[in-house]
Image (spheres, rainbow, N blue to C red):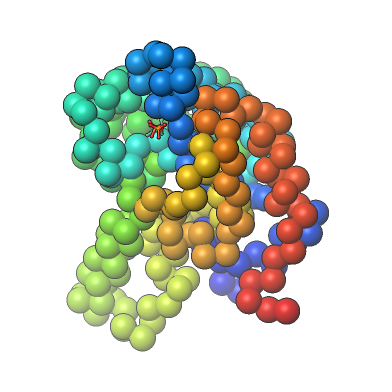
Amino acid sequence: MARATASSPRPEAGQGAAPRHVAIIMDGNGRWAKKRLLPRVAGHRQGVEAARRIVRAAGDLGIEALTLYAFSSENWRRPQEEVSDLMGLLRLFILSDIDEFANAGVRLRVIGDYKALAPDLVSLIDGAMERTAGNRAMTLAIALNYGAQFEMVRAVRAIADRVQTGEIAPAAIDEQMIDTHLDTQDLPPLDLLIRTSGEKRLSNFLLWQAAYAELHFVDTLWPDFDKQCLVDALAHFGQRERRFGGL
Ligand code: FPP
């Protein structure tokens, strides 16, 4: 049987089942700061605290994979100061939390075109991924310089290369093959996608992988998102009947 990858339907994940793979669009840091008359970076700092809290909570709740949208390929359009604040926070997050991940059995993965980031950040990420590669308790995937459309473009280019060399025929290209050329190739199927702060958009996040995922939109701003919010999202997921196009 074909191996289940990030976009495959998972019929066994029906009513009452726990999601294996949860992804979150962490939105609302700026508004959280604005409400308190604080600079935007203060919202991002609290956003990192929330991310830390949710990684621990996801581990406690037995989630196999958690994917966090930390920096989109569109986020470069923000003021340069904010981009550099975000990069600094990411650096700090990896540096300060890598020991905890390593000890807690968390495997760190980065999805997106992260090789285009600053060279020191790229080596930090590569080192952290290498160090935790054998961990099995949970996978934390951080989406960095990520855009779903460009992820698909990269997958198509890789497949086209294989066609060009004669390794595969065009007719051999199917959903499964596309799945295995995406950045999420080694993650379980995406079950639940959460977006905070009241916006109801996917913003170029996991577009292929979300084909059968349940979508959960909450008004809570990301810095206020806590373990109970995650528990509520999982409960909501457990109540839904997933039919994957069947009856
Ligand atoms: C959205 O809030 C958030 C981001 C663009 C960045 C997300 C980054 C973090 C939470 C910190 C880093 C994460 C990790 C995993 C270390 P926004 O600024 O768009 O908020 P707004 O819509 O209210 O302005």
Above or below, 133 against 53 in this view is below
Looking at the rendered structure, the number of numbered marks drawn on it comes to: 0
| Residue 199 percent coordinates (x, y) | 48, 45
The residue that appears at 77% across and 54% down in the rendered structure is: 239
Q: Where is 43 relative to 129, above or below?
A: above
Q: In which quarter of the image is the N terminus?
A: bottom right
Q: Residue at x 38, y 82 (%)?
A: 172
Residue in the picture at 19% in, 26% down: 80
Closest to the observer, 61 or 46: 46
**Placement of 187 over or under 196, stated as above or below:** below
Q: Where is residue 95 in the image (x, y as percent from the top left)?
A: 40, 18
Screen quadrant of the C terminus: bottom right
> At 52% from the left edge and 65% from the top edge, which residue is drawn?
211
Left-right relation of 30 to 67: left
Decide if residue 45 is on the left or right side of residue 231.
left
The quarter of the rendering in which ligand 1 is drawn is: top left
Q: Quadrant of residue 231?
A: top right
**Percent x, y for residue 26?**
48, 36
Residue 144 percent across, percent down from the top left = 35, 39
Residue sitting nearer the eye, 199 or 118:
199
Residue 77 at least partly seen:
yes
Q: Can residue 158 be seen in this view?
A: no
48 or 12: nearer the eye? 48
Q: Is residue 46 above or below residue 143?
A: above
Q: In which quarter of the image is residue 96?
A: top left
Q: Which residue lies furthest to the right in this view?
A: 16
